[in-house]
Amino acid sequence: MAESRAERRARRALMEATEGSKEEKSSTKPKSSKAAKSKSTKSRAKAKRSDSRRGGDKAPQTRSKRLHKDLASSARKAVDPKSPCSIMKACGGCTALNRPYKKQLAAKQAAMEGLFASLCEREGIAVDPIRGMGVTLGDPGKYPSPRGFRHKAATPFAPGKEGAVRCGFFERGSHRIVAVPECPVEAPGARQILNGIAREAERLHIPAFNEDKHLGLLRYAIVRCGWRTDQIMVTLVTAQRDLPHAQEFFEAVAALDSHIVTVAQNINGRPGNAILGEETRIVYGAECMRDQLLGCEFDISPTAFYQTNPQQTELLYRLAIDGMDLHQGDVLMDAYCGSGTIGLCAAKDAQNKGIGIMLLGVERNPAGIADARRNAELNGLTRSAWFMADDATDYILDAADNNERIDVLSIDPPRAGSTPEFLEAACALKPRRITYISCNPVTQERDLHQLLDGGYRLLKITPVDMFPHTDHTETVAVLSRKSASKSFIPVSISPKDMGLSEEKEQPTYANICDYVQKTHGMKVSSLYVAQMKAECGLETQADRSGDRKQPKCPPEKREAILDAFRHFGLIGEDGTEK
């Protein structure tokens, strides 16, 4: 898609402003000399364009140099020479970059206090002071101005004029690309690699993907840089597997930085804005890159989840691990475990303290589970850590049905939060402690209410500033199981005691749960079925809860289960035992 004349002017304006700011630092020439130089440069550029129209040299390398001289798509007025980022107004990623860090933290603190006000009032606690990068809100002295903390950088690609490959950030509120000469919050060198990929693709005539026409090949690139290591991994997302000059392209990408250890190709031919597709293959180097967190080593594959800001990730994980209060022999379940980072850090920390635990990790992404198993081996935890590729909700529902033992539950769900079914099953399992890490405090606040209703109390909630200069905040909540107010007495009733023949087949818990889901469109746990059986005098299994309080069956599920009892002939229409 050809750029408009206004876009070309805007891109030249930004590049001239960027180059001009560099010249100001190194040049002592008077303004008149600079103006003459600028005029001379424009004249030479104009002459080149004239030569091109007359059939002059059109070599790819010459055209690449000319087109990459005006990379940006922002107007001159969007460039603020006093700003720490030349494209801040056009990009819109770091909206608070010009704001003092102390004020940023204070604003996030106020937002979290407002969001969790009802929970804190209910529990009689206050939101902890937000933990920023190198500082906690309330600390005296000068506050830092965080830079270079994003160790993951990405770019979309789009076609430009005459085969150009454009890259950068999407302009705020649009899909128009703003070129990024450098980004102050990304790890040093990451943006140069991304821009280099665009130049190499252009040189080798690998067309960028046009999302409107669904044509082209190169869609995205992702660069991940190690924090404790100097390793770099590059993932190229293409619309098709086959590329022109593929091997030369992959080797050229690997040569952009001597620290690149892995180049992967991910194939995503589907329409839409999803970055990654289902197929990934290594086209250069090792299968994974390696990094370290809290003294543990981690292999990270191209599609596995790994936190973007590792410095704050260590702080986030430390808060969660301290909240777990692990004891000898505990079973720790790490739900939504990704590459196993939280659980393995917790297990290693316990091991260092002489505490032996069993770790159980659940993650639906098979690539993440493969990484987690490899990471357990890297850290000497293979005998005490198990990882399964499964949906966290499905797994915990089965665990609740089977009365599996979970002493501590760690939750780190996606932005949508957890599911009501997962939280219901979590309450049924009755772990002693729950730590809930959230990248979206709004959905976390919703989920915490359900956990409190299910028999838990909120001990503390701590905000963590994972992404300075934005409005994004992550939070760590620590919950403990309430003391039981009443106990349940195990009861064993035989079919003969119920007036039934020993040979008469009774509906199983699964039969009842299945009937409720099909008839009423809702899931119920075996725990709720057992509660209702006990209420109706039908319970035949010994209760294993000891003196711990159980979550009470909600009214709507109570009626659905009673309907199932009537359907299977366990009770009469009046709700009494037959």
Image (spheres, helix red, strand yellow):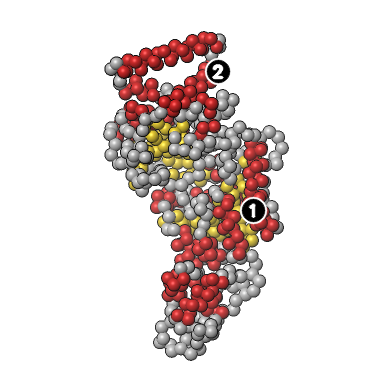
- Secondary structure under badge 2? helix
Which sits earlier in the primary sequence, circle 2 or circle 1? 2
Label 2 sits on residue: 25
Q: Residue at x 41, y 37 (%)?
A: 156
Placement of 234 over or under 521, stated as above or below: above
For residue 236, side relative to residue 225 (left or right): left
Q: Quadrant of residue 457?
A: bottom right
Circle number at residue 101: none
Q: Position of residue 15 (x, y in %)?
A: 47, 23
Placement of 240 over or under 352, stated as above or below: above
Q: Position of residue 316 (x, y in %)?
A: 58, 47
Q: Residue at x 29, y 36 (%)?
A: 243
Label 1 sits on residue: 116
Q: Is residue 280 visible?
A: no
Q: CA distance from mark 2 to mark 1?
A: 48 Å
Instruction: For the N terminus, give its image quadrant.
Output: top left
Q: Quadrant of residue 51?
A: top left
- Secondary structure under badge 1? loop
Mark 1 is on which residue type? Phe
For residue 359, side relative to residue 263 (left or right): right
Toward the viewer: 310 or 273? 273
Q: Residue at x 39, y 38 (%)?
A: 220
Q: Residues within 10 Å of mark 1 (few under 14, many from 20)?
A: many
Mark 2 is on which residue type? Lys
